[in-house]
Amino acid sequence: MTAESDEMARAVAKDSRLGSRAPAFVQRSRPLHAIWRAGIFLVGLAVIAGGVILLPLPGPGWLIIFGGMAIWGTEFVWAQKVLRWTRRKVTEAARAAADPRVRRRNLIIGSVTVAALAGLAIWYVLSFGFTLPWQLG
């Protein structure tokens, strides 16, 4: 972690408010606030469950999971802290990925991998034709 990201994290923590973002009339009534929190928890849980179901399927599973965390973040301090940590890590990763040396390295690794896979595919087609591996026997 860099000093710059620590300063940014402190500035974000100082400027933003942790805790419930429920309307004032809900926060004034303890039973109503408990019901509100339970409702937020259930809605967030349903969204996260939908995201988990979409993880193995083609779709935006992680995006939906983070959306559920954002719903929880409107009411729960721990979810707000998890979202801040995640946002900070994603920002640091994006900054690191933008480094020209890292981009060049990733491009070289990707090119070598594609070339190796293409070579294996050409070797297989030249050796066995277009017969599928499970039909060779």
Image (tube, helix red, strand yellow):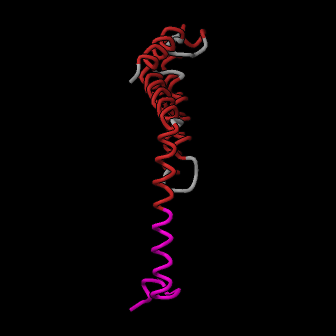
Whether residue 2 is visible: yes
Whether residue 46 is visible: no
- The quadrant the C terminus occupies is bottom left
Residue 118 in the magenta stretch? The answer is yes
Q: Who's the residue at 45% across and 54% down the image?
A: 109
Check the image and name the residue furthest to the bottom. 137
Q: Quadrant of residue 27?
A: top right
Stretch in magenta: 114-137
Q: Who's the residue at 48% across and 40% down the image?
A: 101
Nearer to the camera, 34 or 95: 95
Nearer to the camera, 83 or 118: 118
Estimate the x, y position of residue 9 in percent, counting from the top left.
46, 17
Residue 75 in the magenta stretch? The answer is no
Q: Is residue 127 above or below residue 91?
A: below
- The quadrant the N terminus occupies is top left
Estimate the x, y position of residue 99 in percent, counting from the top left.
51, 35
Q: How many labels does the image show?
A: 0
Q: Is the magenta stretch mostly helix, strand or loop?
A: helix
Q: Is residue 58 above or below residue 1?
A: below
Estimate the x, y position of residue 55 in percent, counting from the top left.
49, 51
Q: Who's the residue at 49% across and 85% down the image?
A: 126
Nearer to the camera, 96 or 23: 96
Estimate the x, y position of residue 73 in percent, counting from the top left.
51, 24
Q: Is residue 17 above or below residue 107?
A: above
